[in-house]
Amino acid sequence: MKAYCFKCRKKVEMKNAELVTLRSGQTMTKGICSICGTKVIRCNGNRKEVK
């Protein structure tokens, strides 16, 4: 899955992606940038599953 890395300033492939549910019920995918190693997230909105 791809996410935007603010350090690299481009969309990168996520490593070790895991699904996290926020208190509001929204889901987001949290992982590590495959280029620089910083944390990246992708908000999935109200969807309960990541495809």
Image (tube, grey):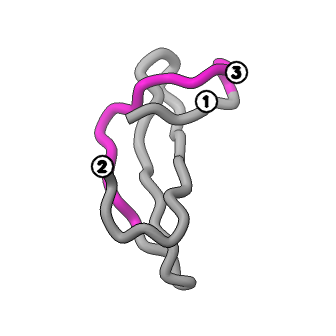
Q: What amino acid does circle 1 point to?
A: Cys
- Of residue 19 and residue 45, the one placed in the foreground of this image is 45
Residue 4 location (% of width, % of height):
60, 32
Residue tagged 2: 51
Residue drawn at x 55%, y 56% as measured from the top left: 43
Closer to the N terminus: mark 2 or mark 1? 1
Instruction: Give the magenta-colored segment's residue range.
Output: 7-20
Residue tagged 1: 5
Q: Is there a contact, CB below 8 Å, between mark 1 and mark 3?
A: yes
Q: What amino acid does circle 2 point to?
A: Lys
Q: Quadrant of residue 34?
A: top left
Q: Residues within 10 Å of mark 2 (few under 14, many from 20)?
A: few
Residue drawn at x 41%, y 42% as measured from the top left: 31
Residue 23 location (% of width, % of height):
52, 84
On the rendered structure, is 27 left or right of 8? left
Residue tagged 3: 9
